[in-house]
Image (spheres, rainbow, N blue to C red):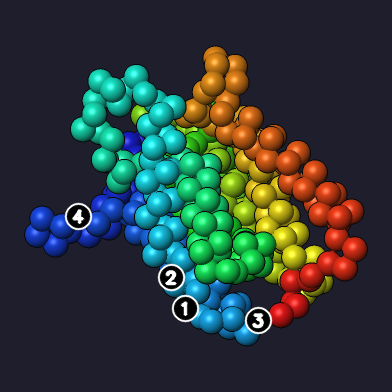
Amino acid sequence: MVDKIEPLNRVMFEIGPLTVYWYGFLIGFGAMLGLWLAVRESQRLGMDKEIFVDLVLYAIPIAIICARLYYVLFNLDHYAANPKDIIKVWEGGLAIHGGLIGAFVTGYIFCKKKGLSFWKLADIAAPSILIGQIVGRWGNFMNQEAHGGAVTREFLEGLHLPDFIINQMYINGTYYHPTFLYESLWNLIGLFLLLYLRRVNLRRGEIFLGYLIWYSIGRFFIEGLRTDSLMLTEALRVAQVISLVTVVAGIILLVIRRKMSKEPVRYLDA
């Protein structure tokens, strides 16, 4: 018999009518931490530090809107019947792939308007995007969402997880896979990998493509454990299809760019 386990409070604090949720705070904190890293790296490469500040003023709100629209479109039956729920982003429901699409398109247009290299900015931004994803997944943890299938407490204890994670994975009488943690740790490894690749001085664009491939491989397998996946059909998960396409496209782009670039521009080049 399991004692009653109270979940962690989703509310960070309240001031009068203002309610700040951990979900929103962690997503915002991850974005700001990523921005700090991108600004610092752009300065190291001799770029104007204001470039990324200007970019995120467009990219972050557009990414949030696209992440929500992406989620709503794949849950259209629910939101058509409950249109007021569309704005309830504090309850979760921001699809990372939708946010990435919005951010990438915004970044591409921004670079065209400013006369900047999209690949250079994308290389600088790639580790920052991972930081946002690493921290943001803990917002899912606080909301008790984006988890996997049912497991036992003994299984979770066998992973040597602290009690606060194990207890938060106890939802409506059942323990679940902490897939938010699996993805956060996978991305953390990817962050160290990308930071190492910066020192290798790869060809321009390859750090960003490396990010796409790394993240998508992890997402493909972790998505298979989740119980709340957006579905194309009863057996086909949207995120797995997108991840598989991204891995293949990333590898093809790497090969094509290497074959076409006889005198390649590298990451550290001015």
174 relative to 119 in the view: left or right? left
In x, y percent, where is residue 51? Answer: 50, 74
Mark toward the start of the polypeptide (4 vs 3):
4
In x, y percent, where is residue 201? Answer: 80, 72
Q: Residue furthest left?
A: 16
Identified by mark 4, the residue type is: Thr
Q: CA distance from mark 2 to mark 3?
A: 17 Å
Which residue is at the front of the view, 67 or 174? 67
Name the quadrant of the C terminus: bottom right
Q: CA distance from mark 1 to mark 3?
A: 13 Å
Q: Inspect this view and state whether residue 167 appears.
A: no
Q: CA distance from mark 4 to mark 2?
A: 28 Å
Q: How many other residues sit within 10 Å of disc 4, few (<14), some (14-19) or many (≥20)?
A: few
Instruction: Name the element at disc 3.
Output: loop
Instruction: Name the element at disc 2.
Output: helix
**Mark identifier at residue 36:** none
Mark toward the start of the polypeptide (4 vs 2):
4
Mark toward the start of the polypeptide (1 vs 3):
3
Q: CA distance from mark 4 to mark 3?
A: 40 Å
201 relative to 166 in the view: left or right? right
Q: Which residue is mark 1?
A: 50
**Mark identifier at residue 19:** 4
Mark toward the start of the polypeptide (1 vs 4):
4
**Mark identifier at residue 54:** 2
Q: How many other residues sit within 10 Å of disc 1, few (<14), some (14-19) or many (≥20)?
A: few
Instruction: Name the element at disc 1.
Output: helix
